[in-house]
Image (tube, rainbow, N blue to C red):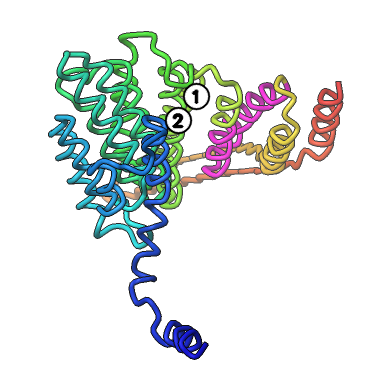
Amino acid sequence: MNAAVAQRHAASFLPDITQNRKRHRKSFHHSWMKETLGAAVASDPSDDLLLSRADVSKFKNPLKQIVCVEMLQEGFHRSYSELFFLLTCDQNRRAATPLEEQQDKLETMRRHLSRAEQAERTSSWTVACEQRLFLGGFFSSVEDLWISLHFYHSCAEREHGGRSRPATEARVCLSEVYLQTGDVEQARQQAERCIQQVEEGGWLDSDGRPLRLRGRMVLWRIYSRMADSLLDAEDYNEALTLLHRGYSMAAASEDKQVEAEAAYRLGLTNQRAGDHNTAKQFFNMCMKIFGTLEDADGLGKSYKAMAKSLERYTHTHTHTHTHTHTHTHTHTHTHTHTHTHTHTHTHTHTHTHTHTHTHTHTHSFLLFLFLCVSASSCLL
């Protein structure tokens, strides 16, 4: 009895100091243990308690070591080197759970890097690029974007297969990631290279969308983002140049919603620059498209912008009248005597009249009529 009590007290006063240290590793190895035990039982149900040395090592060794050893044992040395490089780079980047302790990500990299290396051994360059393209899309979270960029670049810039369909898709993916991270210039370069490559073939992306249309849509977003900084500096000419390029890409994307947004953006920029006539042309254009799409929100903002341009529309009439009258009179009288008189009279009269009239009309009635007609057309 006393011995049992003493044992309980000893257990409470002497906690397992390795418990916390092992708890973290155990959570990452739990699924590995289940898989390995399940495989062992399935292979030999009568001897389910006997595990191989490799199975035991999966319980004892770190996850990083297990994955790397498997790659080396399977002969994928280049894939191992690349994975080890990424894990080393990750150590100084991530404040949360290190990449080497995330089983799903490690297993995904091991699997697809090994497949890519195997495809390269048989000169299946497109297959190798597809594996890297998949990995680029797999690492889509914010903390993993640098890994995504690594795999997209390794897909798009390969010596063999660098102009294949997956490599071209990697270009447009790179432009999207760079745009997401704020590197607009890199995004522009990658999108323009994608447009150049995609003209060589009518490829579809991994989701079945035409790559050429996707590239043009991304390029429109990039040009719009580049125009923002120019508008902040009130450089309207350069901003309008970029927005016109973007509108061309949007119109060629065959997406009417994007085309309408591009026209609306051009209208706003011309309005801001004071060119209300041009602004109204683009507002009319986007209103027609929004009406066809039955986009009530798009129509609403277009009507509001059009009303603003109509209100500020200024008609300037300048009338200038100039009248100049010059009169010169000269009179000379001479006597033949020794006394000579000469009289000269010159009169010059100049009159100049200039009249300038500026009339500013706020077309209240026209504005009211326009909005009524537009609203009725929407209801139809």
The residue that appears at 70% across and 22% down in the rendered structure is: 293
Which residue in the structure is indicated by mark 1? 250
Front residue of this view, candidates 241 and 210:
210
Q: Is residue 271 magenta?
A: yes
Q: CA distance from mark 2 to mark 1?
A: 6 Å
Judged from the image, the secondary structure of the residue bearing numbered disc 2 is helix
The residue sitting at the front extreme is 1
Left or right of 175 on screen, residue 284: right
The residue that appears at 42% across and 33% down in the rendered structure is: 45
Contact, CB < 8 Å: mark 2 with mark 1?
yes
Q: Position of residue 206 (x, y in %)?
A: 43, 21
Q: Residues within 10 Å of mark 2 (few under 14, many from 20)?
A: many
Q: Position of residue 64 (x, y in %)?
A: 25, 49
The residue that appears at 18% across and 39% down in the rendered structure is: 82
Occupied quadrant, residue 74 = top left
Which residue in the structure is indicated by mark 2? 220
Q: Position of residue 120 (x, y in %)?
A: 17, 20
Q: Residues within 10 Å of mark 1 (few under 14, many from 20)?
A: many
Instruction: Name which residue type carries label 1.
Output: Ala
Measured along the vertical axis of the image, is residue 55 above or below residue 96?
Answer: above
Q: Is residue 239 magenta?
A: no
